[in-house]
Image: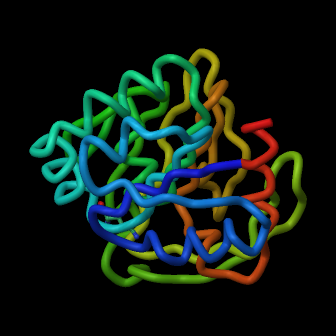
Amino acid sequence: MMVAVLALQGAFEEHEKMLRKLGADTLQIREKRDAEKQFEGLIIPGGESTVMHKLLSEPDIFDVLGERIAQGMPVFGTCAGMILLAKNVEGGKPCFGAMDISVKRNAYGRQLGSFHTDVNFKGIGIVPATFIRAPYIEKAENEAEILAWADGSAVAAREKNMLATAFHPELCDDTRVHEYFLNMMK
Ligand code: GLN
């Protein structure tokens, strides 16, 4: 199974390590012709969503990936990746606007810039979760379903072929969230 990881900026290498640990093949997307290659799923990593948004538009990667996501290719966005998938972004502009969720950027404020906790993930169980200047989900509508909560805020959601987490599962040893995504690709 080939999983593409958007590698313009941010924490993409950690995702690749995790995927390889699970026996998946990975390829990095840095330019348009990478986005046109053969792969069955895509991960949009954490980083800085405004920077990634800009980098996506310039080399025209945006159109190719947006089209593939709209056609049903499984995609998993973590943190900034979740922001890029969301239809509504408080404190920023929507990018792919593919998932029926409203997210708030940097939602935990300065004092809680980074923290670690356990979340109860629907369909998986308790998983460790690292948050870094994270967004949370203010609203999930229509077919978007909340899968996890932390301290009363929604922090993971799924809508059909799309999965998003406000936290970084690639920064822990626990591989189950990535396994969940690989199962979405089967
Ligand atoms: N605060 C970043 C943003 O708004 C997201 C941080 C992250 O991906 N760890 O894009």
Where does residue 65 sit, x and y in percent of width and height? 37, 34
Compared across the picture, whether 59 is left or right of 78 comes to left
For the rendered model, the colour scheme is rainbow
Residue drawn 57% across the image and 70% down it: 16
Judging depth in this view, the residue of 82 and 116 nearest the camera is 82
**Image location of residue 133, percent across then percent down:** 38, 72
Residue 123 vertical placement versus 85 (above, below): below
Query: Residue drawn at (14%, 44%), measured in percent from left and top?
Result: 59
In x, y percent, where is residue 182?
Answer: 75, 49
Q: In this view, does 171 lie to the left or right of 181?
A: left
Residue at horizontal 73 percent and vertical 38 percent from the top:
185
Instruction: Tell me: residue 108, above or below residue 14.
Output: above
Above or below, 120 relative to 97: below
When asked about the image quadrant of residue 19, the answer is bottom right
Q: Which of 97 and 110 is in front in this view?
A: 97
- Asked where in the image residue 26 lies, by quadrant, the reply is bottom right
